[in-house]
Image (cartoon, rainbow, N blue to C red):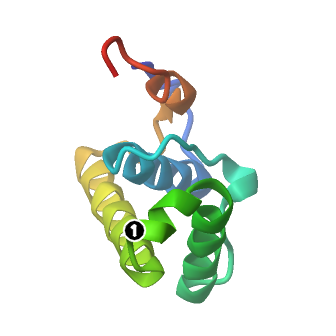
Amino acid sequence: MTITSSGAEARPADAECNAWNAAFHELGLSWFWDAAHLPGGGAGAERSCVREYLTRHQPHLLAAYDADFLVDAILAAKARCAAQMAAAGNPGAAIDWRELQQRQIGA
């Protein structure tokens, strides 16, 4: 895993991306978001964006689980990850999420 800290102040979008990507990683979802993917417009927009992500990229999960259950799980993981990163003191650290999403030996 690559984490760097340039000493520059992190943008709120960096912390937001890290929270989303940490949640996806924690839940085993092979996906990452950059600032262009961030949902704007509050909780309703987040729910809609996550539902769209599931429909486009994880339709097999929707065949097995209720969509609201999955959306709630992703949003809860995102909130938990954001709180943990904020408590650690550097929620906007530069993390190479693509590297983390690479297949592991035996996976």
Give the camera-side residue of 71 and 21: 71
Q: Secondary structure at mark 1?
A: helix
Give the camera-side residue of 57 and 87: 57
> Where on the picture, by quarter, is residue 37?
bottom right
> How many residues crowd around disc 1 within 10 Å: few (fewer than 14), some, or many (20 or more)?
few
- Height in image: 62 above or below 47? above
Residue 48 % position (x, y): 63, 80
Q: Is residue 86 left or right of residue 54?
A: left
Instruction: Provide the residue designation for mark 1.
Output: 64
- Height in image: 72 above or below 100? below
Residue 15 % position (x, y): 49, 52
Q: Is residue 2 left or right of residue 85?
A: right
Residue 61 % position (x, y): 46, 62
Q: Amino acid at mark 1?
A: Ala
- Height in image: 75 above or below 9? below
Residue 33 % position (x, y): 62, 48
